[in-house]
Amino acid sequence: MLESIQRAGRLIFRLPQTGLDWSFGNALNPLRHLGALTIFFLWIVLVSGIWLFIFFRTSVNGAYESVEYLTHDQWYLGGVMRSLHRYASDAAIVTLVFHVLKEFVYDRYRNARWFSWTTGVPLLWMIIPLGITGYWLVWDQLALYVALTTSELIDALPIFTESMARNFLSVSSLSNRFFTLMAFVHLIGLPIFLVFGIWLHVFRINRPKINPPRALMAGALLSMLALSMVYPALSQGKADPSAVPANLALDWYYLLVYPLMKSWSPGMVWLLLTGFSLLLCLAPWLPPARPPAVARVNLDNCNGCERCVEDCPFGAVEMKPRSDGKKYASEAVVNDSLCLSCGICVGACPTATPFREKSSLVPGIDLPDQSTADLREHVTRAASALRGDRRLLVFGCEGSRGLARLENTETAVISMTCMAQLPPSFVDFILSRGLADGVVLAGCANGDCQYRLGERWTLQRLNRTRDPRLRKRVDNEKIALLWSEPWSDYGGPKAAVAAFRNGLNKTRPASATSAVPKPGRPAAVVLAWGLFAAASVVFTFWPRYSQLQAGHAIISVSFSHAGKRLQECHRLSQQELQKLPPNMRKPTDCPRERHPVSVVFRADNKPVFTITVPPSGFWKDGESNIYQRIELPAGPHRLFIGMGDTGKAGEFDYESQDDVSLSAGQHLVIGFDPMTRTFVFK
Ligand code: HEM
Ligand code: SF4
Ligand code: SF4
């Protein structure tokens, strides 16, 4: 089941990937740098955010005006920075979603990779609130919606005894301290956590790709700049608690679940969010992947050269002091829980050479179920069956596709886990012993190795810039390195292998590894960035969201009130006082627990809601918090509200009735004045 979903996902993924391979080339394909691009967009957010912060005023009256000043008066810089800040935040979500999907469909999240996956989930809980608090700071109509809905969500948690949403119901209840708090959370608190979270996320990876190639950085920045010029980010009218905007341009990337609050209870929304996050966290074990047969060190052949440590993409090998008394200072030790059995360390080990004929071929490090000795056996057997004068041995990896179709009397295909599993000495061995006339290494794709660094190390080893280097005596014209992607830089593998074979016996052989020119690439690149920019902005304003039916108004019933105590205070008699220890004697005994508060609300003599709210606090001695939002059609209404605080069913200790005329989009707040003990309609 899981495999079918992943296979289908890979097929879907390949469509844009193949198109982008064609336009960007394999190494610059943005879909191969999704994590790094997310980080780059976050850099843009940070730099533009610093500029906005310089001019931002953290007060109820100053916030909106300062953002308006940046947008309009300082449009050439502040306005651009604001748009960059918003659109780069959205672009980061787009690349992030693709990043997660890609790791999932390519099965790069289980076994030792669980750590990166699971530490990725809290990043979502940092980056989304970062966006939400950003929208809050603008203090426009969307900000008011965000503030109220977020507060309603937070109120559902047993954190505060007071209702947070009440702070945003009327102008008089707004306070500057919320802006200061939000500014702190948005500008300092969450970014610090995010930086630490990203560090932890890539902590266990060897040489994580945290910066995209320069050309991609330039493309990403230019596309965001162009978008900011063409479609500047604007506010949606100053926040006015007495009105409910009919429809809002909602940023769906950050606020996707907010509309659910209209029909679901906050508890249900929390259940969805925590359930989804938990499911994501547990995904690497649903179902658990079969543990790979991890690499094994053979101390007799390990000389402590450290190349396996350098090359392992997952930091699974470390050097420890020698334990067998040999003259070398250290020995390689594999951490089984980190090893993914890719074999890259075997390709790096200088002792994994097929020329060792007298002793048995047991390198310093090897994979138990794909040993180097078996590989040599496989190579010699496959080579002996080849016929003709242009015999090829093609080495493919787990991610290479369609290589089996290349097999014929002149071509044999040998599959390995990763291309970098093949020590360069094998290429020398094959060509110098005349086992084949050419060797092809067909990896999954440039920059997209299933085991992260395999294609990079292979290229460097064959180019003789990384140990173990290919020996100088090997004729480069007899080796082809290509990617098996259909639109790879070298064309499809079939065409590339045919071109390589044809060139083998010519005086100046054609190189299969020279890129196929693709006219029209620059235009395709511009188009791709344009589409990406459009995708980053489209869901920030479409579809528009209406929190209220046309021609309706909202009534918020919101106040705190303490129910009467369950038992009245009781004055202790002399005898009762004598029975108590001296330090606990007090004249009256007041049991703390209070009655719950019941509220009944009717409109036009019809019941709208009836609720009973328990007292807050651990000892049930605090105030009961009443907070309800109701939608009513605009027009005249007779409203009745009654409250009971003595636990007597059907009886009201306070009540009020008022005839009101609601206008469309009006927001009426009904509170309770504790001084006059009357309901207030405002
Ligand atoms: C702010 C959000 C995120 C950023 C900036 C980010 C960035 C990165 C980077 C730079 C890498 C290293 C890529 C490489 O060198 O191969 C990486 C790896 C990874 N990320 Fe993320 N990531 C984020 C969120 C997530 C999330 C939410 C998940 C999944 C729930 C996730 C899953 C993974 C996995 C499984 C790897 C390891 C891939 C491998 O071992 O081949 N990431 N991420
Ligand atoms: S590469 Fe081979 S010889 Fe070198 S430390 Fe690792 S196992 Fe030992
Ligand atoms: S097999 Fe791969 S993951 Fe395991 S130690 Fe070797 S290089 Fe590292």
Image (cartoon, rainbow, N blue to C red):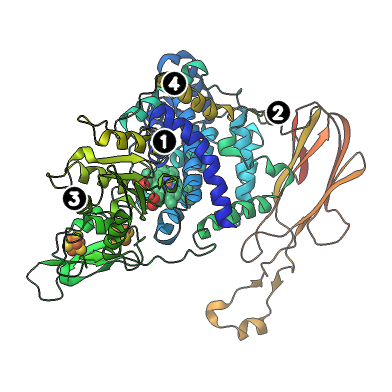
Mark 2 or mark 3, which is nearer to you? 3
Considering depth in this image, is 114 or 229 the residue closer to the camera?
114
Instruction: State the mark number for residue 526.
Output: 4
**Label 2 to label 3: alpha-carbon separation:** 78 Å
Name which of mark 1 and mark 3 comes first in the sequence: 3
Amino acid carrying label 1: it is: Gly
Labels 2 & 4 near each other (Cβ < 8 A): no
| Mark number displayed over residue 492 | 1
Tell which of 63 and 578 is nearer to you.
63
Q: Which residue is mark 2?
A: 243
Q: Earlier in the sequence, mark 4 or mark 1?
A: 1
Position above or below: 513 against 316: above
Q: Amino acid at mark 2?
A: Ala
Crowd around label 4: few <14 · some 14–19 · many ≥20 (10 Å): some
Name which residue lies at 67% across and 69% down: 590
- The mark that comes first in sequence, 4 or 3, is 3
Location of the N terminus (image quadrant): bottom right
* Gap in angstroms between the C-alphas marked 4 and 3: 43 Å
> Where 312 sits versus 172, above or below?
below
Cα–Cα gap, marks 1 and 3:
26 Å
Q: Cα distance, mark 2 to mark 4?
A: 43 Å
Q: Residue at x 50, y 31 (%)?
A: 59
Q: Amino acid at mark 4?
A: Val
In the figure, is residue 394 to the left or right of 186?
A: left
